[in-house]
Image (cartoon, rainbow, N blue to C red):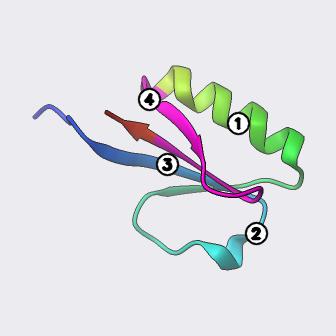
Amino acid sequence: MVLEKAILATITTNASKVTAGTSIFICESKEEMDKVAANLEAILDGISHALSDEIYIIVKH
């Protein structure tokens, strides 16, 4: 099975803003969120998108 388009992960500093559906990574600061997003981009071969100051998603296009 090949994933062509999917949300692979959610990274946030505010857990109350996200619900289940993907892997959720909860960070304590914006700086930690930036590092986690950069690492997950490479690991998952995806692209990071900021939805707000508190939420990033990793997407496979």
User: Residue shown at 31%/33% (left/top)?
Assistant: 61
Q: In this picture, which residue range is highlighted in magenta?
A: 44-58
Q: Where residue 16 sits: x, y (%)?
A: 69, 79
Amino acid tagged 4: Gly
Q: Height in image: 18 above or below 37? A: below
Sequence order check, earlier mark of 1 and 2:
2
Callout 3 environment at 10 Å: few (<14), some (14 to 19), or many (20+)? many
Q: Residue 9 carries which label?
A: 3
Q: Nearer the viewer, mark 1 or mark 4?
A: 4
Callout 4 environment at 10 Å: few (<14), some (14 to 19), or many (20+)? many
In whole angstroms, how far apart are the C-alphas of marks 1 and 4?
13 Å
**What is the secondary structure assignment of the residue under circle 2?**
loop
In whole angstroms, how far apart are the C-alphas of marks 3 and 2?
15 Å
The answer to if 48 sits in the magenta stretch is yes
Amino acid tagged 2: Asn
Return the residue at label 4: 46
User: Residue shown at 70%/36% (left/top)?
Assistant: 36
Amino acid tagged 1: Val
Return the residue at label 1: 36
**What is the secondary structure assignment of the residue under circle 4?**
loop
